[in-house]
Structures are given as structure tokens and as C-alpha cells.
Amino acid sequence: MDTVNKQKAKKVKKDNEAASAAASTITAASLQSVKPPTGPLFNFGQPANTHVTTAQTPAVVTTTAYSAVANEAQSAADIQIAMDSYCKVVEKRLVDIVSQTCYCQLITECALELETKLTSAFPPSELLRLMKEPQEQANRRNKLETSIRRFEQALKLGQENL
């Protein structure tokens, strides 16, 4: 709904800018030469698409043009804005669902299928041998752990003697 309100505000701002660009200042003498339209729609003696206000001096009259938007056209614009916002939300949701589905299918179910195939293809003793850490790597890890313990002990002794 926030997006709809933002787009409506942009439309109103654009309409206001267009109306202010079409505004003109005329003198009272030139206004008298304009014949106002007659009929039931023009009761006030003003042209249909103008709004007349007086400026600070009584001799100058400011005329601002605006276009009246029909209810149907305004409703159509509101629906278009709402549909645009809805499409953006649907797009984000669709991206989320696709990524979740891919994760579920490729990671979870694929891992289960792989585990099933491996456990049925090899006996447990062979699987243990395949998953076992190589002896060379185990020796390196043990040496590193031993050196870390020695450095920690040396650090403690150094801190105690200072």
C-alpha cells in the first residue's frame, strides 16, 4: 500500500507542476474581453477548465488551468497503480519460492538420495575406510595441536613471571 501512495503522490505532484506551468497572469482589461461560456455547467461565468483567484493588487487576476479527471479515469489509474504494486510483490515472492524449491530439491533430497545409494553400494567397513582421515594428515593435525598447547603454556608462564 505504501508503494501505491508513493505513486499517487508522484502523479499529483506531476499534475500540479503541469497546472502551474499552464498558469497565466492577465490584466483586468484583457479579462473583460473574454466572453465566458454559458449554459448549466458554467454557472459562475468562468471558463470550464480555469480557476480564477485574485492576486494582491485588484487590477491583476491570476488564471490557473487544470484538467478535470473523470471518476472512471481516476479509478482506472488507481487500479493500474495497485496492479503494478501487486506485480512487484508477486515477483519478489516468486523469486523466494523458486530459491526455496531449488534448495529443497537439490540440497536436501539429493543428499538423501546420495546417502541411500552409497550405503547400499558399499559395505559399512568399506565406507569407514573411505571416510577415514589419511594418516599423513592426522599426523600433521596432531603436531599442530601439540605445538599450540606448548605455545599456550609458554604464554601462561611468561605472563606469570612478568
Image (cartoon, rainbow, N blue to C red):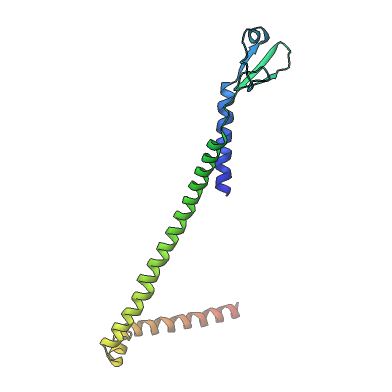
Residue lying at 41% horizontally and 80% vertically, measured from the top left: 144
Give how far across and how far down residue 152 sits, in percent: 51, 80
Q: Quadrant of the C terminus?
A: bottom right
Residue drawn at (53%, 78%) of the image: 155
The answer to whether residue 85 is above or below residue 141 is above
Q: Quarter of the image holding residue 29? A: top right
Relative to 22, residue 124 above or below: below
Q: Position of residue 79 (x, y in %)?
A: 52, 44
Write down the quadrant of residue 157 in the picture: bottom right
Q: Residue furthest front?
A: 40
2 relative to 61 in the view: left or right: left
In the image, what residue occupies the spot 58% across and 39% down?
A: 9
Q: How many marks?
A: 0
Residue 10 left/right relative to 51:
left
Q: Position of residue 117 (x, y in %)?
A: 29, 83
Question: Is 22 located above or below residue 87 in the figure?
Answer: above
Who is closer to the viewer here, 160 or 119?
A: 119
At 63% from the left and 23% from the top, the residue drawn is 41
List x then y, in percent, for residue 91.
44, 54
